[in-house]
Image (tube, rainbow, N blue to C red):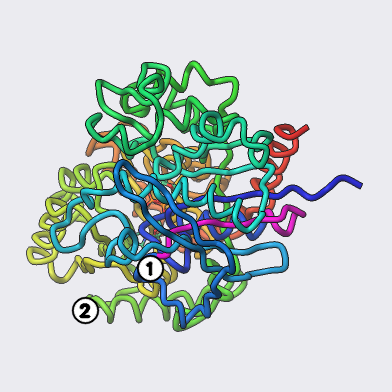
Amino acid sequence: MSKKIELFFISSEVSPFSKTGGLADVSYALPKELQKQGINVSIFTPKYAVIDDNKYNLQDVPNSEFQIQIGEKLLEGKLKSLQIEENLKVYFVVNDHYYGRSGLYVDPVSNSDYSDNMERFIFFSRGILEAAKKINLKPHIIHCNDWQTGLIPVYLKTLYSEDPFYNKTKSIYTIHNLAYQGIFDKGEYYKIGLSWEFFSIDGFEFYDRINFMKAGIIFADKITTVSEKYAEEICSSVDYGYGLEGVLKNRKSDLYGILNGVDYTNWSPSRDKYIPKKYNSRDLTKKILNKKELLKRFNLPFDENIPTIGIISRLADQKGFDLIEAAADELMQMPLQLVVLGVGEQKFQNFLERLEAQYPEKVGIYIGFSEELAHLIEAGSDMFLMPSRYEPCGLNQLYSLKYGTVPIVRATGGLDDSIVQFNRDEQSGTGFKFYEYNRDALLNAVKLALEIFKDKTLWKKLMINGMKQDFSWRNSAKKYVKLYKNLIK
Ligand code: ADP
Ligand code: GLC
């Protein structure tokens, strides 16, 4: 019998402990499914101030204390842990100076990145490698995610390549979003602890600066990203590759697109603990009660015949708010209501608040982060809008399908891979897609959705088509397991 695979899953956010976006959802749901499929998984994540030790009853991990040299500074850290399942444990990397702050990456007061983010994630990466040695937990594979973990594949092939503890360890690097690369001034290079040899075109160097994601892509044994379409897109143009398209193209034979899945124990209307009325595809009348509750929350009038369009999103360029802004006046002439939950860039926040002030009977905005409201919007909306400029995978369109909340999406990345255009004659498909990134394309998709919405029978068919889709993690996790097995063969 072959030995079980020991996997480290490294992520800078893990739901429900810490979350700014979809990475957190993936970083809990995927390991949970991997564990079911026979992998021993240890998740590693920073112990941020938002994570309450007592609420989760985090345990001290004996002998996990470690020290890391960053430039002149000698820093100390340790691990805390939480056992989730027999073969699934979360390790929290503790250092209050670096992680005991109110934000994850961004200072909520100034709304700008913490100036020592580079150090924070050097400490995280090396800290994990050192602490695991201390507690004698030896991984076959380290699965890294996004720029915050880009150093780990590099360290494995440099500082630790001769270390008997790690010299057989393989790395996988998953790209969730290429727009965030971890780019820093080369004056800080000494902090990484590697010789200048690695500050080259085949290493960290990116337009004379340091790029963590680039290094991760170059040094990892395998690379994945979160949809097949995005895997194609990022190799093909600067619009998607953000300057790394050449690097990715060079590694195309090691790059795999694996679509994210959904944790239906958390995101399905028949079990959702946050929504006022649970429902399923056999009994859609209760969905209306959630809509009533949602509209009440936003002080909007209820009318069964006026569709409510929901949006839950980071307020970032990626998500297409400039298109919504360009289309806003015309959208507001249509028979619809718009409900938006989001937090992020000030310019989009301002736009949304202006829109609400101008059309108080049609628009409801909540600026902030609310897990509970996110679930209510999924349950209470009729349609869900994601006009993204690019979208590596996107989770809310997948959640929306299960809630019978019909997605209207731009056909990019995972949105294109997961949503099928509704075909009126065949009554097939799950949503509405548009291709060009412009306001007319968006408006046409919304108009079509509104037209179909008027036909109650057709609309119900469309809702049920979506609710029947299965995007559970089972299939996608199998693809990761296959990749792991091939790597350590
Ligand atoms: P991204 O990771 O690019 O932000 P995804 O669609 O993959 O986009 O995932 C977004 C996740 O974050 C979803 O779980 C969504 O519900 C959640 N989310 C985004 N903004 C908010 C918010 N303001 N309040 C609550 N949840 C949010
Ligand atoms: C990123 C992407 C999003 C994806 C998520 C989880 O933040 O923007 O499309 O679903 O990561 O992979």
**102 is higher (above) or lower (below) than 161:** below
Residue furthest to the right: 1
Q: Position of residue 56 (x, y in %)?
A: 50, 78
Task: Please identify, in this view, whether the residue under mark 1 or under mark 2 is nearer the observer.
Answer: 1
Residue drawn 34% across and 68% down? Answer: 305
**405 is higher (above) or lower (below) than 259:** below
Q: Foreground: 37 or 87?
A: 87
Residue identifier under label 2: 299
In the drawing, does residue 452 fall left or right of residue 83? left
Q: Secondary structure at mark 1?
A: helix
Q: Foreground: 179 or 319?
A: 179
Q: Quadrant of the C terminus?
A: top right
In the drawing, does residue 223 fall left or right of residue 480? left
Ligand 1 within 8 Å of the CB at mark 1: yes
Density class for disc 1 (Cα within 10 Å; few <14, some 14-19, many ≥20) is many
Q: Position of residue 103 (x, y in %)?
A: 28, 62
The quadrant in which residue 246 appears is: top left
Looking at the rendering, the stretch of residues picked out in magenta corresponds to 34-47
Magenta stretch containing residue 67, yes or no?
A: no
In the drawing, does residue 260 fall left or right of residue 186? right
State how far apart marks 1 and 2 are (Cα): 17 Å
Residue drawn 31% across and 33% down? Answer: 190
Specify the amino acid type for callout 2: Asn
Specify the amino acid type for callout 1: Ala
Q: Which mark is residue 374?
A: 1
